[in-house]
């Protein structure tokens, strides 16, 4: 007996949704890249920004640009799925530019990785500011620790998510129609579900990691925010002008997160 999809948008609505999502990503990319470039240029030219901070800002701004471009090329769309045989899951459909299957899957996975990387950007820069203002500055060992922690949690979250959601043959047979309804042609997709027996543990690990890093990132930023402000307020040698600039920098980082 054929498996039926119990929920989801009609082909017309799905196609319209994909088109609007793609053009929204294009518009965001065209707006964000110039803004990122200008803000990065201004920040890197600032005399009050230390060298280590400039490197960190430059790297994370490049990742922001790559993230914007990948969301145009891959345009991942998240679709809740329920079938007549009791399967429930989340599909991530590549609704971007039509390319060979291997390339569309690769770009889709990288877009998820860079989407996850956005969680780490502001907390990492906040941590560097904390080291500069509240400790004795940034040292090579700090850079190594930051990179290791970032890669570890990035692998445990987006890496495990991509592994556990990689479609098996049954997924391709039963769910390809949903992906096609969004883009009008064969495209790549990921399927995340605890109902996939082979990868159910991985799905749980990925989900728990995402929740954990979001909570830790928020708590860390709150801690760094108050520590930095407290240190600046107690520093009698720092001018009021510089204090105001540093507080504005903290606010920008918090808002951007």
Image: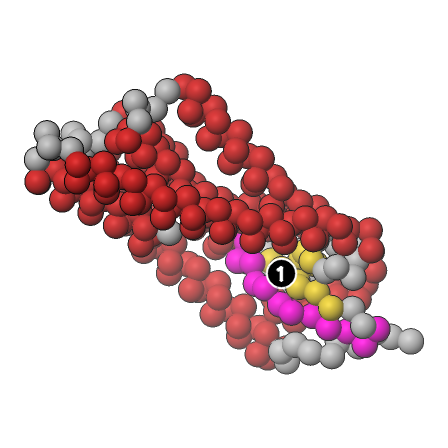
The span shown in magenta is 74-85
User: In the picture shown, does residue 19 fall above or below 204?
Assistant: below
Residue 26 location in percent, x, y?
41, 58
Relative to 82, 9 lies left or right: left
User: In the picture shown, does residue 150 fall above or below 72?
Assistant: above
Mark 1: give few (<14), some (14-19) or many (20+) Cα within 10 Å: many
Circle 1 SS class: strand
At horizontal 81% and vertical 77% (from top left) the residue drawn is 84
Question: Residue lying furthest right in this view?
Answer: 1
- The quadrant in which the N terminus is found is bottom right
Question: Residue lying furthest front in this view?
Answer: 234
Residue 113 location in percent, x, y?
55, 45
Report if residue 235 lies within the magenta region.
no
At horizontal 56% and vertical 58% (from top left) the residue drawn is 76
Return the residue nearer the eye: 216 or 236: 236
At horizontal 69% and vertical 70% (from top left) the residue drawn is 81
Return the residue nearer the eye: 136 or 72: 136
Relative to 256, 145 lies left or right: right
Q: Classify residue 87 by image quadrant.
A: bottom right
Please name the residue that numbered disc 1 is placed on: 93
Report if residue 84 lies within the magenta region.
yes
Return the residue nearer the eye: 116 or 149: 149
At horizontal 66% and vertical 64% (from top left) the residue drawn is 90
């Amino acid at each position: 007996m054929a498996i039926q999809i119990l929920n989801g948008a009609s082909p017309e609505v799905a196609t319209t949704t994909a088109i609007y999502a793609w053009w929204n990503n294009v518009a965001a990319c065209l707006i964000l890249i110039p803004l990122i470039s200008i803000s990065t240029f201004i920040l890197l030219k600032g005399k009050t920004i230390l060298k280590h901070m400039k490197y960190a800002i430059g790297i994370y701004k490049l990742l922001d640009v790559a993230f914007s471009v990948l969301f145009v090329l891959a345009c991942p769309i998240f679709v809740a799925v329920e079938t007549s045989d009791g399967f429930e899951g989340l599909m991530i459909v590549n609704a971007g530019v039509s390319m060979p299957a291997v390339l569309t899957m690769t770009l889709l996975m990288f877009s998820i990785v860079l989407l996850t990387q956005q969680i780490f950007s502001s907390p990492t820069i906040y941590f560097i500011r904390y080291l500069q203002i509240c400790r004795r500055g940034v040292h090579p060992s700090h850079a190594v620790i930051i990179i290791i922690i970032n890669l570890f949690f990035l692998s445990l979250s987006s890496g495990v998510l991509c592994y556990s959601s990689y479609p098996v043959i049954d997924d391709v047979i039963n769910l390809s129609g949903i992906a096609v309804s969004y883009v009008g042609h064969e495209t790549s997709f990921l399927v995340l579900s605890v109902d996939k027996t082979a990868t159910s543990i991985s799905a749980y690990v990925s989900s728990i990691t995402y929740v954990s890093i979001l909570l830790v990132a928020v708590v860390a930023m709150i801690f760094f925010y108050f520590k930095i402000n407290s240190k600046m307020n107690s520093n009698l040698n720092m001018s009021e002008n510089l204090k105001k600039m540093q507080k504005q920098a903290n606010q920008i980082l918090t808002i951007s997160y």
